[in-house]
């Protein structure tokens, strides 16, 4: 897949998830985000408990994707930019690096 195709695919994906926010509404999508986070917690737990089970690994991948989709929607709904999130990630990484050096 060329870079142009990847960009076009991303635009379609973003459009689709923006339409979800419009169709279902902010409150419903916020509740969905919470549900997806809970499902990710369960998938993480099962992946730790059963590290050799492919179905647990595949479920973990699916739940990570679901949460990433919902995080995208939360950023759209609450007008949070990728740059704002990245800035906080950098701050937290610096703080963690300081902790690890102690």
Image: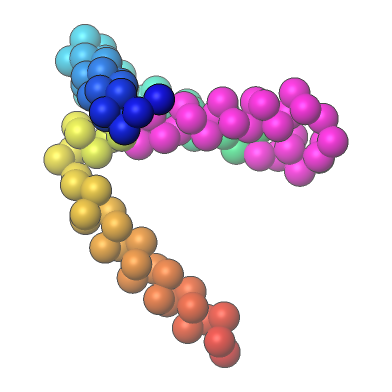
Q: Quadrant of residue 10?
A: top left
Q: Decide whether residue 70 is among the magenta residues.
A: yes
The C terminus - image quarter? bottom right
Q: Quadrant of the N terminus?
A: top left
- Which of the 4 image quadrants contains residue 75? top left
Residue 13 image position (x, y, % from top left): 30, 21
One can see residue 14 in this view: no
Q: Is residue 35 magenta?
A: no
Q: Position of residue 42 (x, y in %)?
A: 65, 33
The residue shown at (41%, 35%) is 68
Total tally of numbered discs in the picture:
0
Left or right: 72 as drawn, with respect to 68: left
Q: Position of residue 91 (x, y in %)?
A: 33, 70
Q: Please, is residue 89 above or below residue 59 in the view?
A: below
Name the residue rendered at 67%, 26% in the picture.
58
Q: Which residues are magenta?
A: 44-71
Q: Is residue 8 above or below residue 42?
A: above
Decide if residue 30 is on the left or right side of residue 96.
Answer: left
Name the residue rendered at 75%, 23% in the picture.
55
Chief SS of the magenta region: helix
């Amino acid at each position: 897949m060329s870079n142009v195709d990847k960009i076009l695919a991303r635009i379609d994906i973003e459009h689709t998830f923006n339409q979800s926010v419009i169709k279902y509404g902010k409150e419903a999508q916020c509740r969905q985000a919470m549900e997806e986070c809970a499902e990710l917690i369960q998938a993480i737990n099962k992946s730790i408990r059963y590290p050799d089970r492919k179905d647990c690994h595949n479920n973990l991948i699916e739940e990570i994707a679901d949460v990433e989709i919902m995080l995208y929607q939360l950023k759209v709904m609450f007008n949070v930019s990728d740059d704002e999130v990245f800035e906080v990630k950098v701050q937290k990484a610096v703080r963690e690096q300081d902790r690890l050096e102690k």
